[in-house]
């Protein structure tokens, strides 16, 4: 297959010539707009230190669970895909040599046809790394050498790529006790043009089922609790750390929870559950109730401090115990499951759904809730916005299904804008470009069917790409 596929100007656009022509014009309106990335997982230190990227396997294969999971499904052990940056051939090394990992990836490349990962990677190979040939088992060494050479070029550093990718805003994901030193350094660096914003991510401090929760809470209270030692001191510490993040540019607080359940408890019951969890005596149901109450408290705090509240539920984390024991989290075996939003989020919306300037962005990996629950919620509550298709759904056809499912109920104005949610820095432009092409395709169909005018479609696509993320994330 020719590498020209990744450069084809009509990729992801409608096959019908007339509709495709409309989509081309719509894409032209937004193709060169700056990238607004209000939720992602790139480490700010990568940009602050501006160090060269590692070798091809350590950059593009080993840390990307989108990639390794599918190769593992074909029968390749994860041990053979876990390169360490710069690893050389050494039989005694703990990790395989990076070139051998790259060869395994290239041999498995046909597995990625039709997948979102394959699309993004092919786009990167062409537009970021300049590969002239399609990767394959036969071209593995040549592509490894070509990418390695590119990684060593003086202009292939994170800061220059940030500029080349036309990124205006990039949000990271950060522990509540992070000192945000890299963010402070970037904000004070007159040579760096762009905004890198921290995001408050308190999961490990809210969920007593996390084995590290007790220790995390003790550190949190000691660092920011203003002398209080009980539940009140715990809440104060969270409020203080959120304030610290706001002072350093944060615009949102993100919550990666198993379910979106929220629960309003009185102060005495919340204190009781907190102490039982702290002592290790809480039952599973009590731990779940406490976390649900803390999600309610996070909403209350967002109303008070203005941080946008985003919720990413519905993943059965670490589905395979043996793999988790060997390799840890984020290694490809997180599996989506069905969730309920209507009842789960109701306690928050009862009290805060109409609160001025409260923004609640709801994500899902369960497509069945799009038209049944999320679009109706966003179509009534001023606070609720529809999070972009995420994780297993951030693929071309799934993004089109999202637009079809939610638009007739919630319109376009209740969308968050595209969220790339990635650790893979070099994939950011490919992901945003794919989203823009999908929005152009969907709008072009509505124009071709005489459901909206072409002029309105041009206004809408600019708002979806640029206006929505700025508005929803208060940028």
Image (cartoon, rainbow, N blue to C red):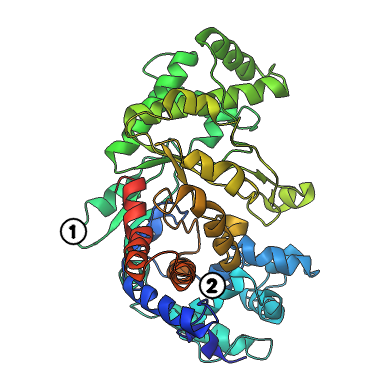
Q: Is residue 265 toward the left or the right of residue 417 in the image?
A: right
State which quarter of the image contains the N terminus: bottom right
Can you say whether 229 is above or below 364 in the image? Answer: above
For residue 39, side relative to residue 49 (left or right): right
Q: Nearer the viewer, residue 157 or 245?
A: 245
Regarding residue 92, the answer to whether it shows in the image is no
Q: How many marks?
A: 2
Q: Secondary structure at mark 1?
A: loop
Q: In which quarter of the view is residue 279 placed?
A: top right
Q: Nearer the viewer, residue 379 or 362?
A: 379
Of residues 257 and 361, which is closer to you in this image? Answer: 361
The percent position of residue 435, horizontal first and vertical second, equals 47, 66
Verify CB contact (< 8 Å) between mark 2 and mark 1.
no
Give the labeled residue for mark 1: 190
| Residue topped by disc 2 | 120
**Which of disc 1 and disc 2 is earlier in sequence?**
2
The reply to whether residue 303 is visible in this rendering is: yes
Q: Residue at x 58, y 65 (%)?
A: 395
**Residue 86 disc label:** none
**Quadrant in the picture for residue 190:** bottom left
In the picture, residue 180 is in which quadrant? top left
Residue placed at 70% from the left, 46% from the top?
Answer: 337
Question: Residue, x 51% and y 23% (percent of image)?
Answer: 218
Q: Residue furthest right?
A: 75
On screen, residue 210 above or below 143: above
Going by the image, does 82 lie left or right of 41?
Answer: right
Residue at the image position 46 percent from the left and 56 percent from the top: 419
The image position of residue 291, as x and y in percent, is 58, 27
Measured from the top left, where is residue 303 in percent x and y? 37, 29
Q: Mark 2, residues whose alpha carbon is within 10 Å: few (<14), some, or many (≥20)? A: many
| Label 2, label 1: how far apart the Cα atoms are | 32 Å
Secondary element under disc 2, as helix, strand or loop, is: helix
């Amino acid at each position: 297959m020719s590498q020209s596929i990744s450069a084809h100007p009509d990729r992801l656009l409608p096959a019908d010539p007339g509709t495709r022509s409309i989509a081309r014009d719509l894409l032209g309106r937004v193709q060169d707009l700056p990238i607004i990335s209000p939720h992602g997982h790139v480490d700010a230190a990568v940009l602050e230190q501006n160090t060269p990227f590692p070798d091809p396997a350590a950059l593009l294969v080993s840390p990307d669970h989108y990639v390794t999971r599918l190769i593992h499904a074909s029968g390749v052990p994860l041990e053979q895909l876990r390169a360490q940056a710069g690893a050389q051939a050494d039989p005694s090394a703990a990790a395989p040599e990076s070139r051998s990992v790259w060869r395994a990836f290239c041999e498995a490349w046909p597995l990625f046809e039709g997948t979102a990962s394959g699309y993004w990677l092919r786009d990167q190979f062409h537009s970021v790394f300049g590969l002239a040939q399609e990767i394959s088992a036969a071209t593995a060494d040549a592509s490894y050498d070509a990418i390695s050479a590119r990684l060593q070029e003086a202009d292939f550093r994170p800061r220059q790529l940030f500029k080349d990718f036309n990124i205006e805003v990039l949000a990271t994901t950060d522990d509540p006790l992070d000192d945000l030193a890299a963010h402070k350094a970037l904000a004070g660096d007159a040579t760096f043009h762009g905004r890198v914003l921290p995001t408050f991510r308190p999961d490990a401090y809210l969920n007593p089922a996390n084995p590290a929760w007790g220790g995390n809470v003790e550190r949190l209270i000691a660092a920011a609790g203003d002398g209080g030692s009980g539940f009140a001191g715990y809440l104060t510490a969270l409020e203080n750390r959120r304030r610290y993040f706001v002072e350093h540019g944060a615009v949102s607080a993100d919550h990666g929870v198993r379910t979106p359940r929220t629960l309003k408890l009185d102060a005495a019951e919340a204190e009781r559950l907190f102490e039982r969890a702290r002592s290790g005596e809480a039952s599973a149901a009590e731990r779940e109730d406490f976390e649900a109450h803390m999600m309610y408290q996070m909403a209350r705090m967002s109303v008070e401090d203005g941080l946008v509240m985003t919720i990413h539920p519905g993943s059965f984390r670490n589905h395979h115990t043996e793999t988790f024991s060997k390799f840890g989290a984020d290694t490809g075996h997180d599996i989506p499951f069905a969730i309920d939003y209507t009842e789960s989020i109701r306690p928050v919306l009862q009290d805060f759904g109409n609160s001025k300037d409260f923004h609640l962005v709801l994500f899902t990996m369960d497509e069945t809730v799009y038209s049944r629950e999320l679009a109706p919620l966003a179509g009534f509550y001023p606070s609720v916005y529809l999070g972009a298709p995420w994780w297993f759904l951030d693929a071309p056809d799934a993004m089109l299904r999202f637009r079809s499912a939610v638009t007739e109920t919630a319109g376009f104005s209740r969308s968050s804008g595209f969220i790339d949610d990635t650790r893979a820095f070099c994939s950011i432009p490919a992901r945003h470009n794919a989203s823009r092409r999908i929005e152009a395709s969907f709008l072009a169909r509505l124009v071709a069917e005489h459901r909206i005018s072409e002029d309105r479609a041009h206004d809408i696509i600019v708002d979806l790409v640029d206006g929505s993320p700025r508005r929803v994330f208060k940028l």
